[in-house]
Image (cartoon, grey):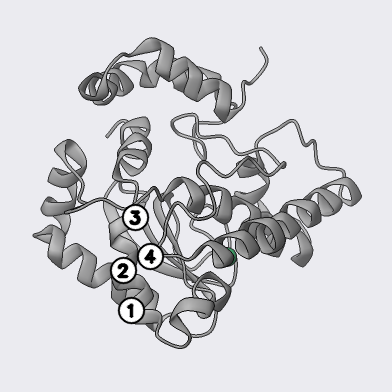
Amino acid sequence: MTTPNRTNRRKFIAQTVKGGLAVTVGLSAAAPLLQSFTTNKNFVPGGFNTGFDQQPLPYAYNALENVIDAMTMEIHYSKHAAAYSKNVKDAAAAEKVNMTEPLEEVLSNISKYSAKMRNNGGGHYNHEMFWQCMRPKKENNAPTGKLLASIEKEFNSFENFKKQFAEFGKNRFGSGWAWLYINKEKVLTLGSTLNQDNPLMDIAEIKGYPLLALDVWEHAYYLKYQNKRADYIEAWWQVVNWDYVAERLHSYDI
Ligand SMILES: [Fe+2]
């Protein structure tokens, strides 16, 4: 059976369910079907496979103004992230990786590959996810439904969750990422990784399935926020795409 890419899978979801409310219900119902498309449920639990090519940005460069400025988005997407995609493909060719298989398969065994693969494979995966984790800003932007209930269960409140998440972003020394992820015990967990590592990697400091990713490399915010990483994180909550985070949670089917 061929493995459809994420775009095709998302079209499948759109064709399967109709209407905003139905998306939440339909995704849960569709999860077993989506899982049947995956080659290994251990690291791609719900069908969010990532290919090696850079996917189109799901909005315009200026769509996140004035939280993230257009120039930052353009340089970030078309220079930094594009380079990770190019370089991971170069590494994959050199290391004889089958690029029709999900990138997640490489990431879950990244200790067997080169530093070039680790840095660029992680960089490509993390950015592909990061773009999806954002959308144009909304007033009172917050999760709803099962995702909100899961967050409140583990972190007492959404406000407390944001505070703790932000601490991981602010305290990551140098460059890296802050994460909300599902750990191996299927519990929502917060953490951060260095450089371009992520929780899918077998050598990462934290391990699990990522739900929400925040890039705290300076290239993500320096033009507008300079050294004020905390201000960038505080503003970022306005553009988090909670529907996407909820899709990833539902796909894990917990
Ligand atoms: Fe980045």
Which quarter of the rendered picture does the C terminus lie within?
top left
Q: CA distance from mark 3 to mark 4?
A: 7 Å
Amino acid at circle 4:
Val
Residue bearing the label numbered 4: 67
Q: Earlier in the sequence, mark 4 or mark 2?
A: 4
Residue at 75% across / 30% down in the picture? 100
Residue behind label 3 places its C-beta within 8 angstroms of ligand 1: no
Q: CA distance from mark 2 to mark 3?
A: 8 Å
Residue at 49% across / 74% down in the picture? 221
Classify mark 2: helix, strand or loop: helix
Residue at 37% across / 49% down in the picture? 136
Q: Is residue 201 visible?
A: no
Amino acid at circle 3:
Val
Residue bearing the label numbered 3: 239
Q: Quadrant of residue 249?
A: top left
Residue bearing the label numbered 2: 235
Q: CA distance from mark 4 to mark 2?
A: 6 Å
Residues at discs 2 and 1 in contact (Cβ within 8 Å): yes
Residue bearing the label numbered 1: 231
